[in-house]
Amino acid sequence: MIDLAETIQQLRSELTKAIDQGEGESLRFAVDSIDLDLQVTVSQEGTAGGGIKFWLVDANAGAKVAKQSVQTIHLKLRPEREGHENEDVMVSCEVTRPSK
């Protein structure tokens, strides 16, 4: 299964990459919010004072996940850049066109 924090870190990395690629482009896109619906399982660490861990459900997890309780969580994220908290985040997306 995939750690929720790792997933959010990967999203952050991809958005940073899109911001960098958008610098100097004549067409960019403002990111107002990011809505994620994720299926997760929850586990608690067995040690005293252990915390709760959220794991994304992997499509390949199969029967193992079927025995656990799966929950859907909705995250609404508003991206902000340090030092630019009240500004829209602008990104670019590379589009590859098929050759004719």
Image (cartoon, rainbow, N blue to C red):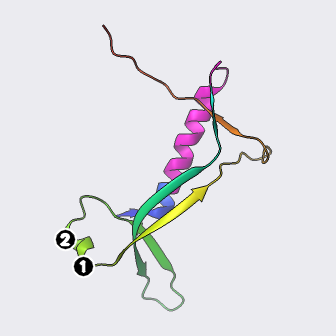
Residue drawn at x 80%, y 45% is 83
Mark 1 neighbour class, 10 Å CA radius: few under 14, some 14 to 19, many 20 or more: few
Q: Main secondary structure of the magenta part?
A: helix
Question: Which image quadrant is residue 3 in?
Answer: bottom left
Say which residue appears at 51% left-offset and 63% top-offset: 74
Q: Which residue is mark 1?
A: 67
Q: Nearer the viewer, residue 14 or 40?
A: 40
Taking the spot 47% from the left edge, 56% from the top edge, the residue there is: 7
Residue at horizontal 50 percent and vertical 85 percent from the top: 50
Where residue 100 sits in the image (x, y, percent)? 30, 7
Question: What's drawn in magenta, residue-wise?
Answer: 8-27
4 or 90, which is in the foreground?
90
The residue identified by callout 2 is 63
Residue 61 place in picture, x, y as percent:
25, 64
Q: Residue furthest bottom?
A: 48
Left or right, 78 with respect to 56, comes to right
